[in-house]
Structure formats: structure tokens, C-alpha cells
Image (tube, rainbow, N blue to C red):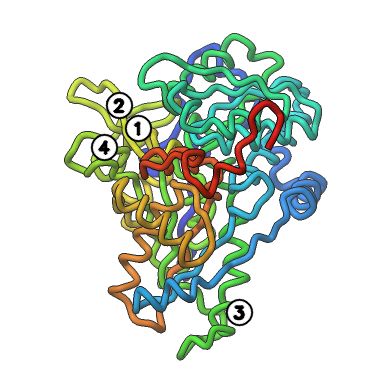
């Protein structure tokens, strides 16, 4: 095992990435947050409350599942899924939101704002605000409001105000811009819960730390899983050969990657959204096709033109539709500790349907990108090797998108007609 990885530095830099690029108006608020996190992150009472909430409210630890049928059909490595889709609210987002909401309460901030793309972070934020009695405002690109309407309704049910953003590409980047503007205007009583490992320091570090519960659990779970499944030649304490996750901003990936960084025999692979192809100009592959620049308070890889203007992105999955990536991912790519690959919309959709029909699991379209690459990679590996995929969320929110792309009208099918509800009658 390695033991030399110590990131970020005191100023929030991951190598040449990260840092804090923010307006003067937010300087005090960011410093206040940094001090609060430094005070509470190792506080026994804070940690005890955090882990109590993870166990009794979220339902952790989430299980690891051996996708045995998929593994057999691929004919290579054994594929395992870390079931973050089974968490309360249906994704990994709740882990980080609980930690930040706990900080907000200790800092005396009664108003919470958040941005969301796929809606899972917004639902998680609305959920914890309902639990703690906090005001909640969620910014969401109007394009995402349309393609993630079930999550918009869930947020409304939970008492949150969802603000559609009409500017720019009307997706996650633009929602984050509007949330930043709100924070500037209401800095005294408002806490901004960022959902990914981006933004000004300490957000990339703080979100990573709260999400690292995912990888920490896997390190305890995987040796027993591998041994129980009769993997030939499994050594005591052996970990998977590959750990894989989808990457937009990158919180679910950093959550599972970070505890595994010291395990030099475990490859870390992040899967970006290649959209209609990496050379099509319609993708969200910030590491594979981006260059260093400053976005949303930190220096990282981002998609930009020759004039340094952020370009529009595309992905079938709203949660990956973002022109940047967390600075720690940029650093891990540069130093070669993590690899980054692309999966297209078509490949992700195929993996979505395959997992539904083969394992009885409906994955989020974001997670389906990682599943798609795991299936491809497994065929090149031996049957006594293993791939652990972070199944970061469930696909309930994506059913409408998948149906539209598949040319299906649910209520026009004979088998569904009797299930319609019109005028209060079934």
C-alpha cells in the first residue's frame, strides 16, 4: 500500500488544481465554512451524530451485490455493485447532504440553497431540510426540470421551492451559477449545500470526506464477498482489481475512490459521459476533452473554447451534464492514479436495459455509464479477477427519459390501459 497521498494542502490545492476563486462578497462566508468544518470534522459528538443518521435514517451500510448472471454472460471478471441505489432517497447524495446540513445547524444558518441536475441532490437536500426544519430552495436548469419531473415533484412534496433556471444551456452549470448568485445576496442566513466535489475550498475536500463512507464500507465488505464467492486464490484481505464509477462533477466516484487510493493493486477508473461521441462536440467529458481553467470557484479541467469560454455539454443523464470535474479527479488523472474513459449515450442506454433484464436492478442513467464500461472491461479480464462498480443511484427518475428515447408511450400500450387514473377513477 502507498501512504504518501496527502491532498489537499492547507489552501485547498490538489496539485495545481482546486483552491478558492470566489467574489469578495463570499470570502467571509467561505472562511466561516472552512473554520466550521475544521472544528467539527473530527469532533466525536459530530461524528457520532453523522454515523447515527447514516445508519438509522439512510440505511447504511449499503450492501455489495455480486452481479453473477452478468458476470457469467460477459465471460470474464466478476462484477460487483455497491448498492448506493438502496439508500434513503435513492442515491449516494444523502451521505454528503446530512453532513453539510449538520454543519449549517451548528453555524446558525436556517436557510439552505442547493443546485441539482438529475434531481437526486435536490431530493436529498429537501429531505434533510424537512427532517431538520430548515428552509430549502433548489435551483435546477429548466431542461432538467422537464426530464427529471418525478424528482421535481418529490422536492415539492418535501417542502422545497424548486427554481427553474432559464439561462445558458438550462442544465446543471446554469443552476450552479444561480445558486452562487443567491448565496452572494443572502450570505448572512444562508448555507449553500454543494452536491459534488467541486466549488471553492473546502467543498471538494468536505464533500469527498462525507462521501468516503462508500469506499470505507467496501474495504470492509469486499474481502468477505470475494472469499464467499469462491474466487480462486483470494488472499486474506484482498480487494477488487478495479474500482469504477461514473464521473460528472465526481462525488460518487471520489466517495469510493478516496479510501482505495492507498491500494496500489486496485485500478481506479472514472467513466465520463461521451454523449454522441468524444469527437462530436456533444459530450460532457471534461477530463478526456477538456483543459485546465477556473469554473465555479476552483481550478480544474473544463470544457472551453479557444477564448476560455465554457462550452455547452450534452449527456443522456442530467447528473453528468456538467462542463467541469472535481479538482481531485483532475489531479488523480494527471498523476496517473486514476484512469478516465468515455461511454456514449447509446452504450449507457444499452447497459441500463441490460441490467434491468439481467439482474432485476433499474440503475440511474448516470450509473449505467459505469455499468456499461464494466461490462466491456470484464470481457478482457480473467474470471478470477473482480470489478467493483459504484451503483450510485436508482433509475426511477429516468423512466420517462428512457421511455421517450425508446419510443414508448406507456399509456398507449394495451397492458397499461387499465392502470390509467383519470378523473379520480382507475
- In-front residue for pair 293/128: 128
For the residues labelled 2 and 4, the Cα–Cα distance comes to 12 Å
Q: Are marks 1 and 3 in contact (CB under 8 Å)?
A: no
Q: Residues within 10 Å of mark 4 (few under 14, many from 20)?
A: some
For the residues labelled 3 and 2, the Cα–Cα distance comes to 44 Å
Q: Residue furthest top?
A: 185
| Sooner in the amino-acid sequence: mark 1 or mark 4 | 4
Reading the image, the residue beneath label 2 is 312
- Residue 323 got which mark? 1
Closer to the observer: label 3 or label 2?
2
Horizontal and vertical percent for residue 217?
A: 62, 63
User: Taking 53 as reference, is 332 left or right?
Assistant: left
In this rendering, the answer to whether 172 lies above or below 283 is above
User: Taking 86 as reference, is 352 left or right?
Assistant: left
| Sooner in the amino-acid sequence: mark 3 or mark 4 | 3
Closer to the observer: label 2 or label 4?
2
Query: From where the camera sits, is residue 59 visible?
Result: yes
Q: Are marks 1 and 4 in contact (CB under 8 Å)?
A: yes
- Residue 224 got which mark? 3
Closer to the observer: label 1 or label 4?
1
Q: Secondary structure at mark 4?
A: loop
Q: Quadrant of the C terminus?
A: top right
- Residue 290 got which mark? 4
Q: Are marks 3 and 4 in contact (CB under 8 Å)?
A: no
Horizontal and vertical percent for residue 262?
A: 48, 64
Amino acid at each position: 500500500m502507498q501512504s504518501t497521498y496527502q491532498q489537499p494542502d492547507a489552501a485547498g490545492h490538489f496539485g495545481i488544481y482546486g483552491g478558492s476563486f470566489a467574489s469578495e462578497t463570499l470570502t467571509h462566508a467561505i472562511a466561516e465554512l472552512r473554520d466550521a468544518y475544521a472544528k467539527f470534522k473530527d469532533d466525536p459528538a459530530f461524528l457520532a451524530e453523522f454515523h447515527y443518521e447514516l445508519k438509522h435514517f439512510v440505511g447504511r451500510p449499503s450492501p455489495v451485490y455480486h452481479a453473477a448472471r452478468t458476470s457469467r454472460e460477459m465471460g470474464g471478471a466478476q462484477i460487483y455493485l455497491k448498492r448506493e441505489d438502496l439508500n434513503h432517497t435513492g442515491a449516494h447524495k444523502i451521505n454528503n447532504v446530512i453532513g453539510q446540513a449538520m454543519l449549517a445547524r451548528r453555524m446558525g444558518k436556517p436557510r439552505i440553497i442547493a443546485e441539482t441536475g438529475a434531481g437526486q441532490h435536490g431530493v436529498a437536500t429537501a429531505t434533510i431540510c424537512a427532517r431538520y426544519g430548515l428552509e430549502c430552495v433548489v435551483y435546477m436548469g429548466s431542461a432538467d426540470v422537464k426530464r427529471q419531473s418525478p424528482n421535481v415533484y418529490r422536492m415539492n412534496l418535501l417542502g422545497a421551492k424548486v427554481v427553474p433556471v432559464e439561462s445558458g444551456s438550462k442544465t446543471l452549470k446554469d443552476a450552479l451559477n444561480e445558486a452562487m448568485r443567491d448565496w452572494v445576496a443572502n450570505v448572512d442566513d444562508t448555507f449553500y449545500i454543494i452536491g459534488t466535489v467541486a466549488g471553492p475550498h473546502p467543498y471538494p475536500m468536505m464533500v469527498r470526506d462525507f462521501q468516503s463512507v462508500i469506499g470505507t464500507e467496501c474495504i470492509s465488505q469486499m474481502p468477505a464477498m470475494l472469499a464467499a464467492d469462491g474466487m480462486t486464490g483470494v488472499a486474506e484481505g484482498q480487494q477488487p482489481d478495479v474500482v469504477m464509477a461514473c464521473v460528472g462533477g465526481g462525488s460518487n466516484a471520489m466517495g469510493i475512490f478516496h479510501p482505495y487510493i492507498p491500494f496500489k493493486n486496485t485500478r481506479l477508473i472514472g467513466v465520463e459521459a461521451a454523449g454522441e461521441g468524444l469527437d462530436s462536440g456533444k459530450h460532457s467529458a471534461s477530463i478526456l476533452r477538456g483543459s485546465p481553467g477556473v469554473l465555479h470557484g476552483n481550478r480544474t479541467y473544463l470544457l472551453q473554447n479557444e477564448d476560455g469560454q465554457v462550452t455547452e455539454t450534452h449527456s443522456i443523464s442530467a447528473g453528468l451534464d456538467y462542463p467541469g470535474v472535481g479538482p481531485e479527479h483532475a489531479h488523480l488523472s494527471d498523476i496517473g492514479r486514476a484512469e478516465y474513459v468515455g461511454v456514449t449515450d447509446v452504450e449507457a442506454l444499452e447497459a441500463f436495459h441490460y441490467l434491468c433484464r439481467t439482474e432485476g436492478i433499474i440503475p440511474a442513467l448516470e450509473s449505467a455509464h459505469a455499468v456499461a464500461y464494466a461490462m466491456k472491461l470484464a470481457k478482457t479480464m480473467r474470471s478470477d479477477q473482480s470489478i467493483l462498480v459504484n451503483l450510485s443511484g436508482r433509475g426511477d427518475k429516468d423512466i420517462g427519459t428512457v421511455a421517450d428515447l425508446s419510443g414508448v408511450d406507456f399509456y398507449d400500450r394495451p397492458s397499461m390501459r387499465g392502470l390509467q387514473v383519470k378523473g379520480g377513477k382507475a
